[in-house]
Image (cartoon, helix red, strand yellow):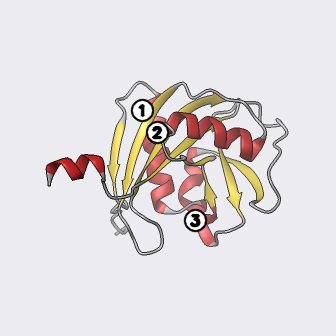
Amino acid sequence: MHTTAFTSPPPRRAAGLALIRDENGRVLLLDKAYRQGPARFGLPGGLAEPGEPASVACRRQVLREMGLTLVPRGLLVVHYMPDDGEVKEGHNFVFDCGSIPSGTPLALPDDEFRGHLWLDVEELCDAVAPYTEWRISNALEAGEGGPVRYLVGHPEFRAAA
């Protein structure tokens, strides 16, 4: 039993995501054509191929999605997401990919993205899904010298009284 758990584990998704900021500290988000509502805005990056480290997937996906060669500098967040019926169980690794000028041209594939935007931290809650805001907020805190964050599932935000 124990040997098969290590030699034939169940499949699990892994993704490498990039936290990229501009000269004003705003966060780069891509507008995903295959999503609707607040979930359409997300960090650049994507799924790792079998046997590919998440940091390599991050670099490869940023090049493919935007035409930029950025090297992940360090891990900021590991976000475990359980299977929700739509997306399989997996881990999203958010890496610090530094900053680029906001006017940098991005070569976004038209069939995958509607465009991109730069948002201040204060604008995130009105524009993105709660799990994306949670992921980015924790990544920004870790990037300011805090420890790497480990997040589980979807955030539980209390309703304003």
Q: Name above or below for residue 140 compared with residue 10.
A: above
Q: Amino acid at mark 1?
A: Ala
Q: Name above or below for residue 93 compared with residue 24.
A: below
As helix, strand or loop, the secondary structure at mark 1 comes to: helix
As helix, strand or loop, the secondary structure at mark 2 comes to: helix
The x and y percentages for residue 39 are: 57, 65
Q: Which residue is mark 2?
A: 139
The x and y percentages for residue 5 are: 23, 52
Q: Which residue is mark 1?
A: 142
C-alpha distance separating marks 1 and 2:
5 Å
Query: Mark 2 or mark 3, which has the lower sequence index?
Result: 3
Mark 3 surroundings: few (<14), some (14-19) or many (≥20) residues within 10 A: some
Front-most of 56 and 158?
56
Q: Amino acid at mark 3?
A: Ala
Task: Spot the residue most to the bottom.
Answer: 85
Could you tell me which residue is drawn at 19 percent across and 47 percent down? 3
C-alpha distance separating marks 2 and 3:
18 Å
The N terminus appears in which quarter of the rendering?
A: bottom left
Asked whether the residues under the numbered discs 1 and 2 touch, taking CB atoms below 8 Å apart as contact, a structural biologist would say: yes
Residue 82 appears in the figure: yes
Could you tell me which residue is drawn at 85 percent across and 39 percent down? 105
Front-most of 65 and 22?
65
Residue 26 appears in the figure: no
Mark 1 surroundings: few (<14), some (14-19) or many (≥20) residues within 10 A: some
Q: Which residue is mark 3?
A: 39
As helix, strand or loop, the secondary structure at mark 3 comes to: helix
The x and y percentages for residue 61 are: 65, 43
Mark 2 surroundings: few (<14), some (14-19) or many (≥20) residues within 10 A: many
Task: Spot the residue most to the left.
Answer: 1
Q: Amino acid at mark 2?
A: Ala
The x and y percentages for residue 38 are: 59, 66
Could you tell me which residue is drawn at 69 percent across and 34 percent down? 22
